[in-house]
Image: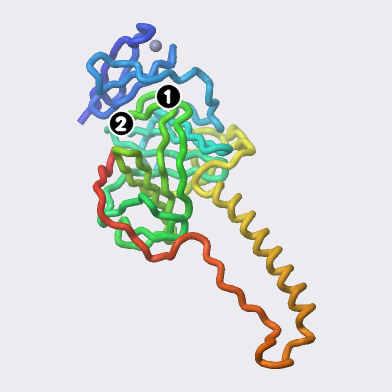
Amino acid sequence: MPLQTKTLACTSCGASLEIKNALKAKVLVCQHCGAQLDLTDPQYAVIGRALKDAAPPRSSLRLGMEGTFQGEKYQIIGRVRYREDPWFWDEWLLMTEEGRYKWLTEGEEEITLWESFTPTEPTNPRGLEEGDTIRPEGRTARVKEVGRARIDYVEGELTWKARLGETISYLDARENGGKYSIEWSEKEIEFYKGRQLSYSEVMGAFGQAEATAVAPPPSPGRKGSSLSCVSIVVIIVILLVIVFLCVACSIISPSVGAGPSTGGYYRGPSVRIGSPSGRTSTGGGFTGGK
Ligand SMILES: [Zn+2]
């Protein structure tokens, strides 16, 4: 079925704008004045204003670029910039000529291609923590990151009513070779599964020479990189504890064997980060598929 396009006049500046997939688009940002138009409203009410160039892309990805992933042609039609200080990342909306969507999340260290899906098991992400497990498709995936990010910038055409300043909760989980992401607000939950790609793969898919890929800015993005910062801190703390224990042991060691009550080893409680694994919340509605 061919896509249904539609032309309309910007509610704010009057410029002529085109919707690429009129049946699915919920928000359109005017490329001239930045007005964010609510397409679900018959009057196309302005629900925000994205200041032009307020969020420069972090690579050579741009709206309008066309690329091929897994043999299918996509065009970049929208972008949402998320911020979770001090980190930020872009989510690019890709659409095929038939109107199928994928998302490309671009952080500092990772680019992931996501598609939405409906989980086979009810999964309620609320209250889950790092280390917990979920089974959205019957296989156990471990929660790697949980956070809350603010929408800093939007452009193009989007399939959901993203509002500037709105906050979205998210959770990223991994199982062997696969990634899951759940994003939710008060009203909606969306489920995605993803595949990690390299920068050169992505730029190649969009017909860009690898050399044009701009070196990512020095702040980490979502999907693993903020986790790695936390990990580094945890590792440093663990190393310090080990060094401390070694020093303590070497001081105490002469007393080892002096009697059962003065064992030279102190066996501390095992440190557990996060909550017990294996807990999978169930229940709760979902509206999989954008
Ligand atoms: Zn306008």
Amino acid, disc 1: Glu
Residue 88 x/y as whole percent: 53, 36
**Which of the 4 image quadrants contains residue 71?**
top left
Residue 124 x/y as whole percent: 31, 52
Helix, strand or loop at label 1? It is strand
The residue nearer to you, when weighing 5 against 218, is 218
**Residue that carries the numbered disc 2 in the rendered image:** 97
**Residue that carries the numbered disc 1 in the rendered image:** 155
Q: Viewed as shown, does residue 60 lie left or right of 285? A: right
Q: Viewed as shown, does residue 102 lie left or right of 39? A: right
Helix, strand or loop at label 2? It is loop
Q: CA distance from mark 1 to mark 2?
A: 20 Å
Q: Residue at x 42, y 53 (%)?
A: 179
**Mark 2 residue crowding within 10 angstroms, few (<14) / some (14–19) / many (20+):** some
Which of the four quarters of the rendered structure image does ligand 1 lie in? top left
Residue 184 x/y as whole percent: 35, 42
Q: Viewed as shown, does residue 211 lie left or right of 172? A: right
Q: Residue at x 31, y 10 (%)?
A: 9
The residue nearer to you, when weighing 88 against 102, is 88
**Which of the 4 image quadrants contains residue 233?**
bottom right
**Figure check: 28 above or below 92:** above
The residue nearer to you, when weighing 155 against 235, is 235
**Figure check: 232 above or below 43:** below
Of the numbered discs 1 and 2, the one sitting upstream in the chain is 2
